Amino acid sequence: MNSNPTSFPRRKFFQTGLALGAAGLAASAARISAQEKAPLKGRPVAISSANGLRATDKAMELIKSGADTLDAAIAGVNIVEEDPNDMSVGYGGLPNERGVVELDACVMHGPTYRAGAVAALQNIKTPSKVAKEIMERTNHLLMVGAGALEFAKLVGFKEENLLTEPAREAWLKWRSNLNKEDNWLGDDDRHAGFFERPTGTINCCTFNEKGDLSGCTSTSGLAFKIPGRVGDSPIIGAGLYVDNAVGACGSTGFGEAVILSSGSRTVVENMRHGMKPETAILDVLRRICEQTVAKRLLRARGKPKFDVNFYAINKAGEYAGGAIYKGGKYAVHDGTKNLLRDSVYVHDDAK
Ligand code: GLY
């Protein structure tokens, strides 16, 4: 199975769902890998969700050639946004409940403390580039829906159909079950379903030898969402936060939980107060677990039905990825190697 619930290659989508780990101990103590204990200092870093190995490679190539850290992160993310085989991001992303692809993205530039974001954007393959245009060309930070599309066209983006055949077929299959697996809550919360659903996304954060940080997050959001639903990915402080004096963090996974916890900002604040990236991430993941109390979001033994992942770098170039459940991975290029590494985690299994 695909062990990272943030990435959903089309062939595996309906086979895997969000099954999170098969076996393991009941203990909830987090594990910190040897990798996280031996960070590489003074080197550039590009870190990403597990679907971002090509993104970290591209970002590092650009960082080494002297590119701005934000341009490097966006160029990496663009590879995945334009890839129809990643059904969680950009072109080929899974659509909303009406079969329309709606994209969310944000960017944040550490050296100038600026950000841009776009939500519920239709018909543009690369929402991360639109977010950067909003940052650079306007006094605004977040634009949504029809206004965002109009802005994108005015600055030169071309409209395209983003719904690929595999995504349309996946939507049709889901549509045939509508009312059993939709997002509408019934009068009686106990009967309202929370069905594990892809929330795949890409985040990429970058760090150069000068110590500058930037980040970019992009997604097609929760598959088959109610039209207009916006997740964490375009929310500065939730799906991404960069403080050039402290560090950067981005997220993938169940966006509602990340928004509620102000996830990425809280990870960065934890690092500001001295926590290493892995500790800062685990603190927020544990809080998300503790604060998830709605029955429809909980498994029989009280663990969340969803997963959340964070990816963080601090000002020393130390980095980590973390998830609620064991089995998560993240991509990282440390200037010499570009690898998928194991994320630290809160729970051994999803029982
Ligand atoms: N993390 C992506 C979303 O929930 O939309």
Image (cartoon, helix red, strand yellow):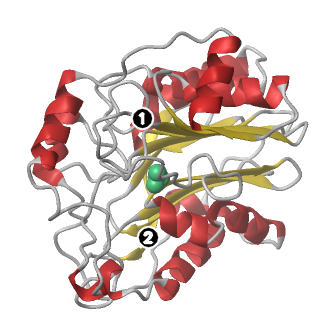
Does the image show residue 186? yes
The residue labelled by disc 1 is 89
Residue occupying the point 44% across, 27% down: 80
Q: Residues within 10 Å of mark 1 (few under 14, many from 20)?
A: many
Q: Is residue 73 above or below residue 25?
A: above
User: In which quarter of the view is residue 303 placed?
Assistant: bottom left
**Which sits earlier in the primary sequence, circle 2 or circle 1?**
1
Residue 235 placement (x, y as % from top left)? 65, 52
Residue occupying the point 82% across, 38% down: 140
Does the image show residue 215? no
Q: Please report contact status of discs 2 and 1: CB closer than 8 Å, yes or no.
A: no
The C terminus is located in which quarter? bottom left
| Element type at mark 1 | loop
- Foreground: 244 or 133? 133
The residue labelled by disc 2 is 345
Residue 128 placement (x, y as % from top left)? 60, 29
User: In which quarter of the view is residue 148 placed?
Assistant: top right
Q: Amino acid at mark 2?
A: Tyr
